[in-house]
Image (cartoon, rainbow, N blue to C red):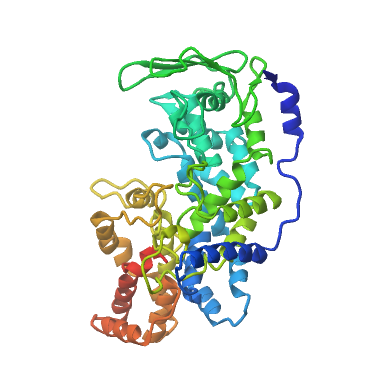
Amino acid sequence: MRTVLPVLALILAAAPVPAAQPRKPADVAAAVDRVIDAKLAAAKVTASAASDDAEFLRRAALDLTGVVPTPEAAAAFLDSNDPDKRAKLVDALLADPHYARHFANVWYDRIIPRTPISTRIDPASLRAALREDFAANRPWGEQVARVVRCDGTPTANYLAFHRVNGDMGGIPMANVNARAFSRLFLGVRLECAECHDDPHKPWTQDQYWGLAAFFGRAVVDEKDRSFLRIAETTGYKTPKGSTFKLTPRPDGALTIHSEASEGVGKSMPPKVLGGEPLTFPVGKPMLPALAAWAASPDNPYLAKAAANRWWAHLLGRGLVDPVDDLRDDNPPSHPEVLDLLAAEFTASGHDLKHLIRCIALTKAYQRTSRAAAGPKPDEALFARMPLRPLTAEMLLDSLAAAYDVAELLPRNPPPPRRGQVAPLTRKNFVDLFNTNDPDGDPADYTHGIPQLLHLMNGPALNAGAARVEALLRAGAAPETVVETLYLATLSRRPTASELKRKLALAATHKTPRDGLNAVLWTLVNGAEFVVNH
């Protein structure tokens, strides 16, 4: 067994990712498209046409910033004749403050699963820490290392990952933390190797518990908020009543006591996936070594897992599906694309914005969601863009943008007075509309009657819009108001027939104000608004 001291010193002294010259995003995108197009041709599948400017604008804005563009930005983009305007749009969206807020929301939902325990976590502080990382474009390996090590100010921001993912009925469990770490940041599902070697995957029980051992000394002390301390023996009752216990040893190994495990009584030394067993001095924190490996180029999983996740975020499906199940017998649909993007991501120093540019400039990302003629192609061919319902945060923020208000619903309203009904808050809305698994199929439309009734009857959407009010005060003609409302919601101008119908609808109301607010209500309650296409 190797000692950790010289190994750890070398790892911690190394740069997270070696400096290299990444290629131009357009060149990477072209290389990706050659592989995608060749596979489409081999399958005799006709790809959908390129999206028009309005479709691409709205899609890119939602994917990269989580909110629809302003009507002014939409009009400027649609009217531009610049041949490079799509690449420039991607650059502008990546520089927008909404970019960091959006990806902080996306990763908060992954890091903090929706469980009863998650209600004890202060979401504001962790979201703020994640926003800071994405705004600074901190290298992804470094971001992952910060989560594992619990860096940041305050440290409690990142304690949330360990506290929620590793808590079984109030007892932190090292093995549960290891599962969450490997699934989120390595794209690997290890749980089937908990009790025995997985017969269907290349993971052994030693690998599972070797990774879990790193978390053996990581127990959150709720009283004094300390984190890295030697753990006591911990355990929980299984559904069958047997006791599952883990005992961290002074040298860092983890001893299993479980009636359900083939490894009962074994002591597993800490080791990274594919690595050698390590030993640690008594009381020495072990997570820094795991964090350093996670961010280093010696980790063969991080770059592929990240490339696969961001591809899935932008195209609705991973090159490997599900995104957290990378293994030999679940191969990528386009292995050359995954290898290419992972290598480019590593060469760029784990630069997330560079990775996004490489994907967003592909023809595959810029296809329309309208299907081409012929049989429905396999989704794994990426012949067209799938329709994806907006997430809860995207929907609420886009509603606020359409109505031209900073917040459609209050975040922290004062307590209601006696006899008053408590106002609907942002948290209420997000809880109601958060019906999708963060790592589930993004094309699943899981909203039902409660969500639809809320959109149709919600007071905030029926009280009139600041946008309509401002346009009428400026003396805008009804035709101009309707066009602006289309740009503010659908990022396009109305067709002649749509304009005629909406003006006719507005004319059925008592006042122009009421009629034009009714037009906006129909737009935000339509399928085209609530779907990213």
**Residue 90 vs residue 157, the one in the foreground:** 90
Spot occupied by residue 248 in the image (x, y as percentages of width and height): 54, 16
**Residue 466 vs residue 261, the one in the foreground:** 261
On the question of residue 50 being in view, the answer is yes
Answer with left or right where residue 505 lies relative to residue 114: left
As drawn, 77 above or below 362: below
Spot occupied by residue 302 in the image (x, y as percentages of width and height): 60, 42
Residue drawn at point x = 76 percent, y = 51 percent:
20
Spot occupied by residue 206 in the image (x, y as percentages of width and height): 54, 23
**Total marks placed:** 0
**Residue 151 vs residue 39, the one in the foreground:** 39
Figure quadrant of the N terminus = top right
Spot occupied by residue 127 in the image (x, y as percentages of width and height): 52, 45
On the question of residue 153 being in view, the answer is no
As drawn, 423 above or below 277: below
As drawn, 509 above or below 297: below
Residue drawn at point x = 40 percent, y = 76 percent:
486
Answer with left or right where residue 85 lies relative to residue 19: left
Figure quadrant of the C terminus = bottom left
